[in-house]
Amino acid sequence: MALENSSPHAVTLELGERLRQARLNADMTQAEVAERAGVSRKVVVNAEKGHVQLESLVAIMLALDLAGQLDGFLPRQEVSPVQLLKLQGRKRLRASGARSETSKEKNEW
């Protein structure tokens, strides 16, 4: 399934199904995965349905020996050369967001 054009709900369902298939491929029960991940069996059940918190997802992936796939899941993002030039070599720590003209007018005395 191509995830690029899918809704967030469809993506989470697909990720849950992939977790389930990885567990079955590893020939592990939900209880075994839960024990190795340090979570409850209910968390594993919910993860396989696409309902999981990020920390639990990572714990389950580690329990299934899928840690090597985490870099492919969300690769490290480098600072773009344009942003680096704007920041004069400093690393950007937060986004500035879009400023509206009305906020500038409010600040003028």
Image: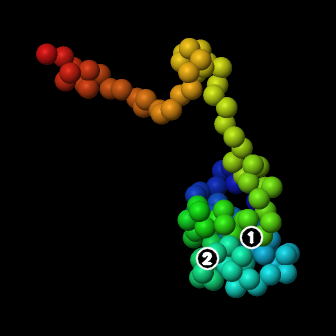
**Looking at the rendered structure, which numbered label has been put on residue 109?**
none
Q: Is residue 71 left or right of residue 107?
A: right
- In the drawing, does residue 103 fall left or right of residue 37? left
Who's the residue at 69% across and 64% down the image? 15
Image quadrant for the N terminus?
Answer: bottom right
Q: Is residue 30 visible?
A: no
**Local secondary structure at mark 1:** helix
Where's residue 47, x and y in %? 63, 72
Q: Quadrant of residue 98?
A: top left
Residue 105 visible in rendering: yes
> Label 2: which residue?
39
Residue type, numbered disc 2: Val
Using the image as rendered, state which of residue 5 and residue 105 is in the foreground.
105
Q: Quadrant of residue 52?
A: bottom right
Residue placed farthest to the left in the image? 109
The residue nearer to you, when weighing 56 against 36, is 36
- Residue 76, above or below 72: above
Q: Quadrant of the C terminus?
A: top left
**Residue 42 drawn above or below residue 12:** below
Residue receiving disc 1: 63
Q: Tell me where residue 13 appears, x and y as whole percent.
A: 64, 68
Of 23 and 63, nearer the camera is 63
- Kindly identify the residue that appears in the image at 85 percent across and 81 percent down: 27
